[in-house]
C-alpha cells in the first residue's frame, strides 16, 4: 500500500493544479509588476579591479549589472530587462544593452536610452568595501 498517495489521487481526480513555488519573494517595481531580489544581495560581488573604468560587467548568476565610472564610482542595477525579462548582456559606450529586443539603458542611471523597454532598470545598492564591490 502506498501511504500519502490518497490526497494526490483525489486532487488529480478533482482536476486540481499544483504549483511548486521556490526562490525569493518577488518585490514590486515601477508599473506594479514584480521581479525577484537579485541573488547575492548583501554579498561581495567582485573585486573592483575586475570592473573596467567607464564600463561594467554583467553577473547573470546574481542578476546584477555593475557599472563603473572614473575611480571607485560604481552603480548597480538589476540585470533583468524591464521590457520582457531577458537578461542584459553587455556594457559598452555608456550603455547597458539587452540582446532580446535591442533595449539600451544608461550605464550611470539605468534610464532607458532606446526601447522597446519603457521603464528604467531598477537600482541595486552597491558600494566599494576594502577593494571589493558589495551589494546591499
Image (cartoon, grey):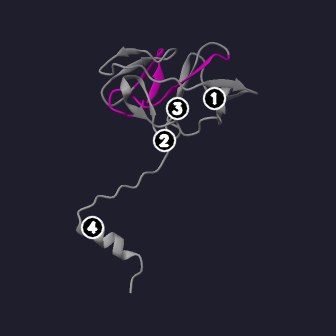
Callout 2 secondary element: loop
Relative image position of residue 82 (x, y in whole percent): 38, 27
Residue 34, given in percent of the width and then of the height, sits at 41, 33
The crowding category of the residue bearing disc 2, from other C-alpha atoms within 10 Å (few below 14, some 14 to 19, many at least 20), is: few
- The secondary element bearing badge 3 is classed as strand
Q: Which residue is mark 4?
A: 12
Residue 73 belongs to magenta span: yes
Indicate which disc residue 25 carries.
2
Within 10 angstroms of label 1, few (less than 14), some, or many (20 or more) residues? few
Looking at the rendered image, the disc whose residue lies closer to the viewer, 3 or 4, is 4
Give the secondary structure at mark 4: helix
Percent position (x, y) of residue 120? 42, 19
Q: Residue most toward the bottom?
A: 1
Q: Which residue is mark 3?
A: 64
Pick whichever of labels 4 and 2 is earlier in the sequence. Answer: 4
Q: Nearer the viewer, residue 29 or 114?
A: 29
Q: CA distance from mark 3 to mark 4?
A: 40 Å
Res 46 quadrant in image: top right
Amino acid at each position: 500500500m502506498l501511504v500519502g498517495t490518497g490526497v494526490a489521487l483525489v486532487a488529480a481526480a478533482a482536476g486540481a493544479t499544483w504549483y511548486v513555488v521556490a526562490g525569493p519573494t518577488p518585490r514590486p517595481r515601477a508599473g506594479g509588476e514584480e521581479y525577484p531580489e537579485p541573488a547575492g544581495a548583501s554579498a561581495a560581488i567582485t573585486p573592483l579591479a575586475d570592473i573596467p573604468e567607464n564600463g561594467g560587467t554583467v553577473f547573470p548568476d546574481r542578476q546584477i549589472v555593475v557599472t563603473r565610472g572614473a575611480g571607485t564610482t560604481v552603480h548597480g542595477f538589476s540585470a533583468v530587462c524591464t521590457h520582457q525579462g531577458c537578461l542584459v548582456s553587455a556594457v559598452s559606450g555608456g550603455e547597458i544593452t539587452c540582446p532580446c529586443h535591442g533595449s539600451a539603458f544608461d550605464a550611470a542611471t539605468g534610464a532607458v536610452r532606446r526601447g522597446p523597454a519603457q521603464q528604467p532598470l531598477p537600482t541595486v545598492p552597491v558600494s566599494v568595501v576594502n577593494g571589493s564591490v558589495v551589494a546591499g
